[in-house]
Image (tube, rainbow, N blue to C red):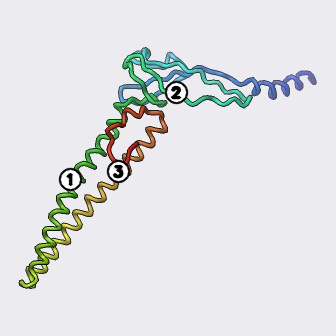
Amino acid sequence: MKPLVIFLILLVFIWPAQGFAFTAYKWMDEEGVVNFSDDLGRVPSQYRDRVKEEVVDDKANGEVNSPPQPMLTKEEGRTTDIYGLSGGYWKERVRPWKDQLKEATENYEKMQKKFLESAEELSQRRYGSRTQYKMNIIELDRLNKERMGYQAQIVEAKEMLARISREAGESGADPEWFNDLGEGQN
């Protein structure tokens, strides 16, 4: 009995020091979602030609694993980031925010011009009816609120573009994918 206990104790302390390794299968589906499995049989047949095999090694000897590198997908012939996301994914994620930034900037500039024209008109109408004066003030207030709404959209779009750019950088996305992101990016 004593030798069995000693063997079990040694086994408990020695086995974790050896570490373990297993093979993980990684693939990206049609929606751009990266999937993992430890069983090749669980990978849907239509994705088996895209599977990337990775050996996951958990050693307790203090080795530091190198960061994941962008992989080259066989089917597409292009690089992806560490999560298997391509430039197309990142560009599609950026597109609505770039569109919002462009549209909000154009609308803001138009509204700014109208606001300044109305303010100029109001300053020239010092001598008119009180009703007309109040209507001009109300119109200026309306234009200012609309202008501020566009300004808020500009700020939101710039913040989101900066956030997406940071996420892309952290995921190892190719900087070439972001050459035309516009303001707030790099």
User: Quick one: SS at disc 1?
Assistant: helix
Left or right relative to 40: residue 63: right
Left or right relative to 1: residue 142: left
At 42% from the left edge and 20% from the top edge, which residue is drawn?
73
Cα distance between the residues tagged 3 and 1: 15 Å
Residue on which the image places disc 2: 69
The amino acid type found where label 1 is placed reads Glu
Residue sitting nearer the eye, 178 or 88: 178
Residue on which the image places disc 1: 106
Cα distance between the residues tagged 2 and 3: 29 Å
The mark nearer the N terminus, 2 or 1, is 2
Residue extending farthest to the right is: 2
User: Quick one: SS at disc 2?
Assistant: loop
Percent of width and height locating residue 56: 61, 24
Left or right relative to 43: residue 143: left
Write down the quadrant of residue 148 in the picture. bottom left
Residue sitting nearer the eye, 115 or 44: 115
Q: Residues within 10 Å of mark 2 (few under 14, many from 20)?
A: few
97, above or below 4, in the image: below
Residue on which the image places disc 3: 158
129, above or below 150, in the image: below
On the rendered image, what quadrant is the N terminus found in?
Answer: top right
At 42% from the left edge and 46% from the top edge, which residue is drawn?
163
The amino acid type found where label 3 is placed reads Lys
The amino acid type found where label 2 is placed reads Gln
The mark nearer the N terminus, 3 or 1, is 1
